[in-house]
Image: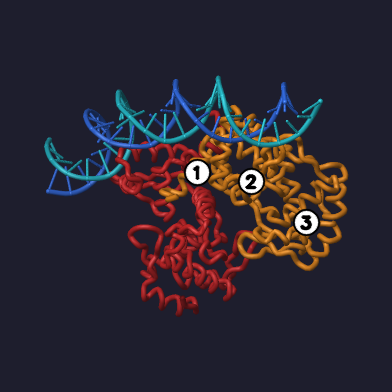
Chain colours: A orange, B red, C blue, D cyan
DNA sequence: TAGACATTTCGGCCCCGGCCGAACTATTGG
DNA sequence: CCAATAGTTCGGCCGGGGCCGAAATGTCTA
């Protein structure tokens, strides 16, 4: 396949309203069924099917069949990152006192949400700040962090699955991810995902049924205080 | 203006082949005339004019009239960043042993190029490394550097316009920018731009007529040795 | 094995948006 | 002041691609 203009092809895929709606739903990092995505996009199943096939073909999405359902998810964190950069542009654009998109104003979303597969918003930043201020995490290069010895211990005590996170070697271990609501980087990559997993497994946080919003439970609030020495 | 789907609107703008060609030309950080961009996109002037107006309207581009010409440039580094992320996706997509995009393999481009408005490639890294190793630049936070007192002096001796760079306060002063060919951060932001300016003003480097490639002149090579204590 | 449900494939309609020709405005230079 | 050049606006053509209905395929349940 000869690519005439790689940029326009990828952008055009994201440039259709139906496909963009699907991608935004998938930004929660979870896998969704084709019908789910069709509903989110406001199109019929057959139309959605076509869109999804094209995005899989272009390696924007990955598909997995399970029973009579087919689950789609973003193919990689890079896809999520590209979508975030575009949304950042779209946000900056709407400055002239016009009503900003709802997802930008939603206070719950600003408070805590998933960003692909890790925690973002005030809670994500609180965790990240705690880790850096205590010397568990150090900047490494322009877009990564490295886990210090004390950080290693801290994660073990919390039961964070570091081995599992390190096993995925096709992936950055501790990545910096720009938080659109806080305008500073929070922890992402395999470690970020492992931390988020721990929050969900321990019942510190719960995903809302729809959307990227995450609710911090009471025990989660206490854990932030006792384990991270911070509060939100 | 009510925005139905901010993501799709921005992506759709980049998703047209003609507009994408223009944006890719503008990735050199320079301002180009409307006719220039029309030619790059392979469309007539009136078609290009329409495209340009739409991109200005959407705050992707900024326009400046000068005589009977109108110069267009990317509106911000964020736009450049979004384009880069999309191109990264497009590149990753072509993994199956297919020929990588030419701009990834070009040795001159890897050696020295502009990245939006500052120097990148081996030369950009050499300058950055020299500044950090001599203690002129220190990491600050996750994505910035701070200029030390010795760095301040060094810049003054070289005639780098620090005051001018500081005056643009809407902009990060010394930013870390990930170099795609070197895989490490080089200096960008207002200071990075001022350094690049100095290189061009002193005749140490010359922009090639087309594209982002930059040629290091003989005096530039000497300057790297005498002023920066390094070589490439 | 039948019926329900999820998904895909096929075919055809139709509209949005990119394209250009022509005409108009603005700036420069002789 | 006129010709040349850069850029924009307007109007109309036309094709790609998004949409859905119908029907096929696949999978689970009874």
- Which element carries disc 2, helix, strand or loop? loop
Tell whether B70 sits left or right of A127.
left
**Label 3 packing within 10 angstroms: few (<14), some (14-19), many (20+):** some
Identify the residue at image location x=68%, y=44%: A29
Subunit bearing disc 3:
A
Mark 2 and mark 3: Cα distance apart in space: 19 Å
**Label 1 packing within 10 angstroms: few (<14), some (14-19), many (20+):** many
Q: Decide which of A225, A117 is in the foreground and name it.
A: A117
| Residue A61 visible within the image | yes
Between disc 1 and disc 2, the foreground one is 1
Give how far across and how far down residue A53 sits, in percent: 56, 39
Identify the residue at image location x=65%, y=37%: A25
Identify the residue at image location x=67%, y=41%: A65
* B144 shown above or below A200: below
Q: Decide which of A133, A218 is in the foreground and name it.
A: A218
Subunit bearing disc 2:
A
| Residue A221 visible within the image | no
Q: Decide which of B58, A5 is in the foreground and name it.
A: A5
Residues marked 2 and 3 touching at CB (< 8 Å): no
Tell whether A145 sits left or right of B39.
right
Q: Earlier in the sequence, mark 1 or mark 3?
A: 1
Mark 1 and mark 3: Cα distance apart in space: 37 Å
Q: Earlier in the sequence, mark 2 or mark 3?
A: 3
Residue that mark 2 sits on: A180
Give how far across and how far down residue B173 sits, in percent: 55, 58
Mark 1 and mark 2: Cα distance apart in space: 21 Å
Residue that mark 3 sits on: A130
**Label 2 packing within 10 angstroms: few (<14), some (14-19), many (20+):** some
Q: Earlier in the sequence, mark 1 or mark 2?
A: 1
Residue that mark 1 sits on: A11
- Which element carries disc 3, helix, strand or loop? helix
Q: Decide which of A88, A190 is in the foreground and name it.
A: A190
């Amino acid at each position: 396949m000869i690519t005439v203009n790689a940029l326009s092809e990828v952008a055009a895929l994201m440039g259709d309203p139906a496909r963009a709606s699907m991608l935004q739903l998938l930004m929660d990092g979870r896998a969704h069924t084709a019908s789910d995505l069709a509903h989110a996009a406001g199109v019929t199943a057959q139309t959605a099917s076509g869109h999804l096939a094209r995005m899989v073909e272009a390696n924007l999405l990955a598909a997995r069949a399970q029973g009579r359902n087919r689950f789609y998810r973003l193919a990689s964190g890079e896809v999520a990152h590209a979508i975030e950069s575009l949304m950042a542009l779209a946000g900056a654009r709407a400055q002239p006192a016009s009503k900003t998109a709802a997802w930008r104003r939603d206070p719950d979303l600003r408070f805590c949400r998933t960003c692909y597969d890790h925690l973002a918003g005030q809670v994500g930043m609180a965790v990240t700040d705690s880790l850096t201020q205590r010397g568990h995490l150090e900047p490494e290069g322009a877009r990564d962090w490295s886990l210090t010895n004390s950080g290693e211990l801290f994660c073990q005590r919390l039961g964070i699955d570091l081995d599992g996170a390190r096993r995925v070697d096709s992936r950055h271990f501790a990545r910096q991810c720009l938080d659109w609501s806080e305008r500073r980087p929070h922890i992402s990559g395999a470690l970020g995902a492992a931390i988020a997993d721990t929050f969900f497994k321990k019942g510190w946080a719960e995903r809302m049924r729809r959307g990227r919003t995450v609710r911090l439970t009471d025990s989660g609030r206490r854990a932030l205080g006792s384990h991270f020495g911070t509060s939100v």
